Amino acid sequence: MNASASATEVDEEMSVSEEKGGKRPGRKGKKSKYTAHTADKYELYQHAVQSPETDVEFVQRVYRDLRGEEAMHFREDFCGTAILSATWVKTDDGRTAEGYDLDPEPIEWGEKHNLAPLGDAGERVQLFLEDARADGRRAPDVRIAQNFSYWIFKERAVLLDYFKKAHESLAEGGIFVIDLWGGSETQDKMREKRKVDEGFTYIWDQGEYFPGSGDFTCKIHFKFKDGTKMKEAFVYEWRVWHLTELRDMFLEAGFSQVDSYFEEDDDDRDAEYHLDNEGEHAAAWIAYLVGQK
């Protein structure tokens, strides 16, 4: 996760429209305790962007549907603050997790704020300051790369190598899950905002998309009720990957079954995801891609 935070103002000429849905959401407003000078960007990100209970419930359901049993060991790539791993181990006393990320700052934050409060359950999560392509300590039943994090791999050969390593790492019958965002809005330069339940505004800043390379720069800013702003809390240098080419690479990587699950309602952060290998055209849509070993 590439990020830099500042309690400076977002440019006043920033033209911001109301968010219509997608993976750039927040939740809706109440009294805020936050200002740009006191807020923690990782806490803001978890409130505004992540939905760990929904994600964990989804992968557990899919594994159960495919295997007829419960998944127990979980691997979170590009884990950041490891909120998914923390949520995973809370669902069963026998569940374990491991997370991988190269950035020490979010890992340290997650150990303090997400794992330590769990007590003994937090000890069932191991975090490693290693590349997401590193060999794991134990074959996972479920391995996940969330929030489009794998888009940092801009070359097909590099991304395919990652997918092959993910396939090889899984326990027999295990699943590898990535989320993806598509539709014409992924190619538009725009800035959108959404009020978050905890009392601040989340601003998704989409930079220019280059069709020849797929290069795409996005930023996250936050604005607070006292008028202060945090500019460029998170900055992403990505390549836009499309569902069909990702599915092809999953199959090439060795997955025996590959399915897409589309979000039922992109205006609802806790929406259900349903198996659909065609999908419906929309300006913006969110889906999971699931490969089974």
Image: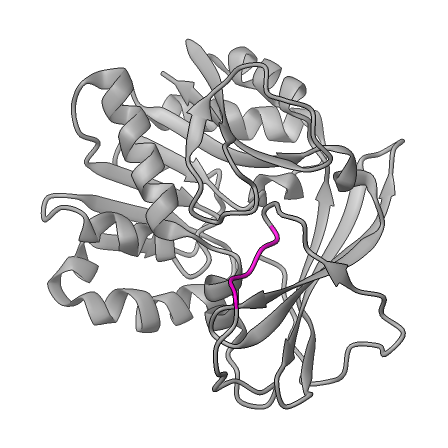
- Residue 172 visible within the image: no
Q: How far from the left and from the top, in percent, is residue 121?
A: 15, 58
Does 117 appear in magenta?
A: no
Coloration mode: one colour
Q: Is residue 127 above or below residue 199?
A: above
Q: Quadrant of residue 176?
A: top left
Of 104 and 28, nearer the camera is 28
Of 273 and 136, nearer the camera is 273
Q: Which residues are magenta?
A: 24-28
Q: Quadrant of residue 174?
A: top left
Q: Could you tell me what secondary structure mostly forms the magenta stretch?
A: loop
- Residue 213 visible within the image: yes
Q: How far from the left and from the top, in percent, is residue 29?
A: 52, 72
- Name the residue located 28 percent from the left edge and 17 percent from the top edge: 66
Does 27 appear in magenta?
A: yes
Q: Is residue 291 left or right of residue 248?
A: left
- Name the residue located 58 percent from the left edge and 55 percent from the top edge: 25
Q: Quadrant of the C terminus?
A: top left
Q: How far from the left and from the top, in percent, is residue 280?
A: 63, 22
Q: Is residue 4 above or below residue 83?
A: below
Q: How far from the left and from the top, in percent, is residue 145?
A: 48, 40
Q: Is residue 281 left or right of residue 118?
A: right
- Name the residue located 26 percent from the left edge and 48 percent from the top edge: 88
Q: Is residue 216 left or right of residue 161?
A: right
- Name the residue located 53 percent from the left edge and 15 percent from the top edge: 277
Q: Is residue 5 above or below residue 173?
A: below
Q: Quadrant of the N terminus?
A: bottom right
- What number of labels is visible? 0
